[in-house]
């Protein structure tokens, strides 16, 4: 019996939230999950948008790479 294990080399994930604290918690939770499959954070990009009602909206893109 022959087993072949393929590891994920790169992974990009997108996050969104209504406030910065919630966005940070989502990203930190995913960092812990990806650490279990040997992926570390390579880069983070984030943006904030304010709609016509003055409400803020935060998004982030996190690029994970194999350690």
Image: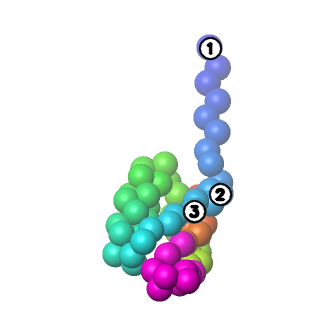
Q: CA distance from mark 2 to mark 3?
A: 14 Å
Of 17 and 61, which appears nearest the observer? 17
Q: How is the image coloured?
A: rainbow
Whether 19 is drawn above or below 7: the answer is below
- Residue that mark 3 sits on: 14
- Residue that mark 1 sits on: 1
Whether 39 is drawn above or below 43: the answer is above
**In this rendering, the label closer to the viewer, 1 or 2:** 2
Residue 46 as seen in the image, left or right of residue 4:
left
- Residue that mark 2 sits on: 10
Q: What residue do we see at 64% from left, 30% from top? A: 4
Q: In which quarter of the view is residue 22 placed?
A: bottom left
Label 1 vs 3, first from the N-terminus: 1
> Contact, CB < 8 Å: mark 1 with mark 2?
no
Q: Which residues are magenta?
A: 47-59
> Contact, CB < 8 Å: mark 2 with mark 3?
no
Tell me the number on the disc at residue 61.
none
Q: Secondary structure at mark 3?
A: strand
């Amino acid at each position: 019996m022959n087993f072949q294990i393929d590891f994920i080399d790169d992974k990009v994930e997108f996050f969104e939230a209504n406030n910065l604290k919630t966005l940070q918690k989502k990203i930190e939770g995913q960092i812990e999950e990806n650490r279990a499959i040997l992926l570390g954070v390579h880069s983070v990009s984030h943006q904030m948008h304010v709609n016509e009602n003055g409400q803020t909206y935060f998004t982030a893109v996190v690029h994970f790479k194999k350690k």
